[in-house]
Structures are given as structure tokens and as C-alpha cells.
Image (cartoon, rainbow, N blue to C red):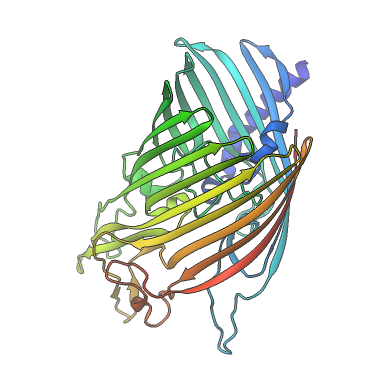
Amino acid sequence: MKYTNLLSILLLTFLSFSHLIFSQEDELLPPATTRTSGKAQAFGKELYVTPVKGFAYRFTGQTTLEGAYDSRQIQAFFQDSIAYFPLPITFDPRGLDVFDKDQATLVGLSVSARTLFIGPSIWGATTNGRVDLGFGGLSDKTIWIARLSNAYINFIWRRSTELRIGHYYHPMALAKVYPTNVNGGEGIGYDPSRKSPIIRIRHNTGNWKFVFAIAKQFNSEASRWAVLPDLFFQLNFYQHENMYGAGVCYRAEVPRVETDFGYKTTEQLNMLYTFAFARIVHHLFIIKARVTYLENGPAFGTIGGYAVADRNTITDNRQLVPLRNMTFWVEAIFKGSKTLEPAVFVGLSKALGAASKIIKCYRNEDGADVNLSTGITNVNYMFALAPRLRAVFKSLILGFEVEYTRAAFARASTEQGWQNDYDEYGKIVNSKASGNLALYFTASYSF
């Protein structure tokens, strides 16, 4: 048993250094093994270690093989195993679509290890926590072996009030209402999600739950320069196993402290996010749905960004306005069988432009038009339809998914006449769509 305790100490010591191997992509979307989904949650075997000085631990984890096939080149994450949207139709000098080429990939080294612990009472509250370590293989942009994905402590008073401090999902990523796609994407592009340092308070009273939180975007100069943290409030109503709610989040960013012409600037971008959701549980199915309004959506993995409403041509000081978008998704999971779990996911995201008129571009000294908008601003809409099937054999879960995604694009700012694809509010009025058919397979073993 002493060797088990020594292993626990070594693991926690290693976790304290693993954050050095962080990438911005990891923060935006964790691999599927970080947050197990579907029936996988029911099959994690728990190994309890003898309490040491008032602490008790348990360890769970998962190892996964992921395979993907795409009929078209895509914008994606994690070795192209998680699709974001198909790349736009782009013709070469012969009139051939450059990105009309299928592809396939396998991601073999995808492992997560979770340490849950219970500690002594502090300030009259019971304490517990969680530390997650994720292992990954090689990506096209980043080589990473291990990373710290979650690390937090909970203080719980009489099961009615909970204080969470640490690094976890941003409050905009809901714990019980998120897509559980086989490909592990968790509805990226449709369901806002990222990891953040947070301080979160939840309070239950009867059928109601109140959530207040502050958070900061990890590794972001724009968030740090804005000083104010993200301010989040959410209200939930519970009716038996059913759950309904809504929330709002305020964020601020200062994208730069010096203009392109070398002048000091403190221009701030103020953003608002609102959402409503429902989770309905029946003995034969679970239905989850969410609609979200976002301003500057890329911080949470959706389309959008920000634009310039006014600009000083001498100093290059700018008045910034967020570009807005709406997302909606619904997922139906059928649970009549103990072994087979069929489900379907549908997602839609639509760009709305800015609330005020914008300046699309300005002409530099070389006579080129410089685009003043920032973010994923040339996507008019995204759509996804993804039926899937999970098969559960004790600790082994096999997943199969067919996903059709479609996205419509305005012309890139490097193309002549691109300004004509946007109106005076930055809303796309002319776009061309491309589609991708993807096949996914996963084999996950929980331990």
C-alpha cells in the first residue's frame, strides 16, 4: 500500500509541471477523453486508496482509439480528428477545386487519467477536488505529450451551497447540457466551450439553482489587459430529472495597447452572451437543446469576431464593435437498450453582423485594402447533422458516427471585390457553400 501512496504523490507532482505543455487549442477544446460522454460515465472502475491524513483518493481514466474519414479537406482540431467546418470552394488556374480531396486519420495515443479526492472539513464545509491529466500524440501544429486539463477544489456547505476554485470548463460550457458526439468534438461551433481559471458559486433552494462565477481566458493578453474578469450568472429550474435554465455572461477584451501607427491605445471590446437550454429525461430517451447568442464567438469555439465602427486615420485608434452570431443545437439520445445507444445531433450557427455600421477596410500606402475585421468573419452559416451509435460491452465502448457538415463562405479579403459580400453592418449578403461527409469510429476502454 505504501507504493500506491508513493505513486499518488509522484502523479500529483508530475501534474504540477504538466501545464507547461499547454497549447491554445487544448484550452479551446479538450479531447473526448477529458469529459467522458454517454454511457461511458457508468463504467469507470474505481480504485480506492487508504486515506492519508484525512484524505481519500480514487482513480479513473480512459484510453481511446479514434479514426476519421472526410470526403473533403476541413478546418479541424487534433490531427483533423475533430472537424470544425469544410474548407471553402477554392479554384486553381485550371478551374479545379483545390480542397476537393478526401482524407483519413487515426489518433491512437489518446488517454486521460482522473484523480478524485475527498479532504477534511474547512470552515464548516466538506471538501473534495479533481485533477485530470491528458495524454495525446502529435498534431499538425503542436507536439504535446501530457497536459493538465482540470484541477479544482470544491467547498460544499450542507449540500446546498458549493464553491469551486481552480481550472475547469468556463461557466458558458454547461455541465449537463452539452453534445456527446462520438468524434469527441462536443458540438464545437454550436455549443460554446473552453477551459478557464474560475471561481464559481452554486446555491440550491427547492427546485431552483443559482450560479454565479467569474473567469479569465487562459493565456490571453486581450483578456488580461481588460482587467475585469468574465462575469457570469445562470438560473436553473429542476422538475424531477428534467432541467431548464438560462444565463448571461459579460466579457471584455483590450486587443492591443499600441496602434499600427505606434500610438498608445486602450480601446476596449465589450461583449454579451446569453443562452437558454433544456434537458428532458424520459425512460426511453434524453433530449438536450440549447440556443445561444454570442458577441465575438471565437473565444468559445464559434464563428464571429469583431469589427471597427470608427477609426482615426492619423493615429489608427479604433472604436471596436463585436460581430454577433446565434447558435442552436439539439440532441436526442435513445436509451431503451442496455448495450446499444443510438442518437442524433443537429446544429446550426448563423452570423448576424454588428449592431452598428462598420468600416470594412482602409487603403494602406501600397494601395491594398486592409480588412479591419478580426476572427472567423467570412462564414455566413454552419450546419451539422450527425446520427451515431454507441455499443457498450462492460468497460469497452465502441462508437460509430456519420456527420454531414455544410458551411457558406464570403470571399476571402485577398480576393478582388470581397467587400461586396458584406453589407454596411458586416453581415454577409453573398456566400458560397461547401459540404463534407465524415465517418468516425472510436474504441474507448474505461478503467
Question: Number of labelled discs?
Answer: 0
394 and 295: which is toward the camera: 394
From the top left corner, tell me how far across and down residue 114 is, in percent: 65, 31
Residue 384 versus residue 236 in the image, above or below = below
Residue at (31% x, 39% y) in the render: 228
Residue 80 versus residue 13 in the image, above or below = below
From the top left corner, tell me how far across and down residue 134 is, in percent: 65, 40
Residue 256 appears in the figure = yes
447 and 221: which is toward the camera: 447
**Residue 307 placement, left or right of 126:** left
From the top left corner, tell me how far across and down residue 321 is, in percent: 28, 57
Which quadrant of the view contains residue 263? bottom left
**Residue 2 placement, left or right of 260:** right
Name, please, the residue furthest toward the right: 393
Residue 201 versus residue 135 in the image, above or below = above
Locate the N terminus and report the quarter of the image it occupies: top right
Residue at (43% x, 76% y) in the render: 411
Residue at (41% x, 43% y) in the render: 276
Locate the C terminus and report the quarter of the image it occupies: top right
Residue at (25% x, 53% y) in the render: 267
**Residue 264 placement, left or right of 87:** left
Residue 23 appears in the figure = no
**Residue 440 placement, left or right of 198:** right
From the top left corner, tell me how far across and down residue 284 is, in percent: 64, 39
Residue 396 versus residue 239 in the image, above or below = below
